[in-house]
Image: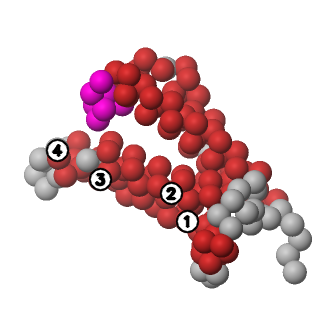
Amino acid sequence: MVAALIVRCGLVLLFLPFSALDKVLNFTGAVGQAQEVFKPRVLAAAVLLCGLGIEIFCSLGIITGVADRAAAFVMAGYCAMTAVLYKQFWAQGDFWANPGGKGRGLFWDFLKNLSLGAGFLVIVVGTNGHGLSRFMHAPLASTHPYSAEP
């Protein structure tokens, strides 16, 4: 049970507290970063607030085990979307030409986002894949991560 808590805390550590707190404490800067993708300031702020909500509520769901499959599914999608929207290594033009360039750095961040998303999907499907049918049947159900194993 303690191991499950430690692993789940490790999965969400980037988001809660760090990324969420950074969005709160540096809201103006975070909106500016969001405007790189979503040009209108109002839209960027709305997207940022949605991301903040995802980071807080889904992280708490994963840690507590409350609707943790649904929370992990949303977090996996969030990781994939942030990778595609903010880690566009292919758009830099220096990926093959400069090993120390921005494209190469973004590539590793892109892969980290996708890998973290895959870690969240393990909560959704379980280590043996049987959790997927449970998720499809009852997406808001808990995996009961802290109950005694049979």
Is residue 111 shown to the viewer in this render? yes
Kindly identify the amino acid type of the residue bearing the numbered disc 1: Leu
Q: Which mark is residue 76?
A: 2
Q: Which residue, given by chain and number where applicable, does mark 3 sit on?
A: 107
Mark closer to the chain start, 4 or 1? 4
Which region shows up in magenta? 33-40
Q: Give the residue drawn at x 56%, y 59%.
A: 73
Q: Which mark is residue 5?
A: none
Estimate how packed mark 1 is, as few (under 14), some (14 to 19) or many (20 or more) residues with alpha carbons within 10 Å.
many
Q: Secondary structure at mark 1?
A: helix
Q: Nearer the viewer, mark 2 or mark 3?
A: 2
Kindly identify the amino acid type of the residue bearing the numbered disc 3: Phe
Mark closer to the chain start, 4 or 2? 2
Q: Which residue, given by chain and number where applicable, does mark 4 sit on?
A: 92
Q: Secondary structure at mark 2?
A: helix
**Residue 56: in magenta span:** no
Q: Main secondary structure of the magenta part?
A: loop
Q: Nearer the viewer, mark 4 or mark 2?
A: 2
Estimate how packed mark 4 is, as few (under 14), some (14 to 19) or many (20 or more) residues with alpha carbons within 10 Å.
few
